[in-house]
């Protein structure tokens, strides 16, 4: 797992601002199927946004930490019920964090 500094986190936050949430976590909470789908999305996109619905039994911050541990990703931010996760691609990354 990589760690990022405050400049890198700010860069990722700004990149996530214009993104739409690609997952909605509802009353089922964090299932193995959701974890697998998030893992695949992180592999393809690197940076994803999730929406935690009010029916979700988990606290958004707790759910974000659980998902990040299961997918080996970083929690970029949790604002209200929106969660942003990041995992750098193994091959060619879209996000150049080294220069920040």
Image (cartoon, helix red, strand yellow):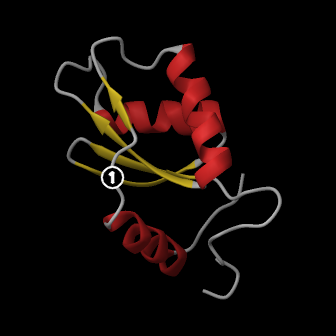
Residue ID at (60%, 46%)? 42
Residue ID at (38%, 74%)? 14
Residue ID at (56%, 25%)? 35
Q: Quarter-wise, where is residue 19 in the image?
A: bottom left
> From what the image shows, is residue 36 above or below residue 32?
below
Q: Residue furthest top?
A: 28
Q: If the image is split into quadrants, where does the C terminus sit?
A: bottom right
Give percent across and percent down for residue 54.
16, 26
Q: Quarter-wise, where is residue 86 in the image?
A: bottom right
Give percent across and percent down for residue 49.
40, 48
Instruction: Decide: few, some or many residues near mark 1? Use Cα within 10 Å; few <14, some 14-19, many ≥20.
Output: few
Q: Is residue 68 left or right of residue 26?
A: right
Viewer-proximal residue, 65 or 33?
Answer: 33
Give percent across and percent down for residue 2.
70, 59
Q: Residue furthest right?
A: 91
Q: Considering the numbered disc 1 on the image, is that residue within a helix, a strand or a loop?
A: loop
Residue ID at (32%, 66%)? 17
> From what the image shows, is residue 6 above or below residue 70?
below
> From what the image shows, is residue 69 above or below residue 4?
above
The residue pinned by badge 1 equals 20
> From what the image shows, is residue 54 above or below residue 4?
above
Viewer-proximal residue, 61 or 56?
Answer: 56
Q: How many marks?
A: 1
Q: Is residue 52 left or right of residue 16?
A: left
Viewer-proximal residue, 60 or 87?
Answer: 87
Q: Quarter-wise, where is residue 96 in the image?
A: bottom right
């Amino acid at each position: 797992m990589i760690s990022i500094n405050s400049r890198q986190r700010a860069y990722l936050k700004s990149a996530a601002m214009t993104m739409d949430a690609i997952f909605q976590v509802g009353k089922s909470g964090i299932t193995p199927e959701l974890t697998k789908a998030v893992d695949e999305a992180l592999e393809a996109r690197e940076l994803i946004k999730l929406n935690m619905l009010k029916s979700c039994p988990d606290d958004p911050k707790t759910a974000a930490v659980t998902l990040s541990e299961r997918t080996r990703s970083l929690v970029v931010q949790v604002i209200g019920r929106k969660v942003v996760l990041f995992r750098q691609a193994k091959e060619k990354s879209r996000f150049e964090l080294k220069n920040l």
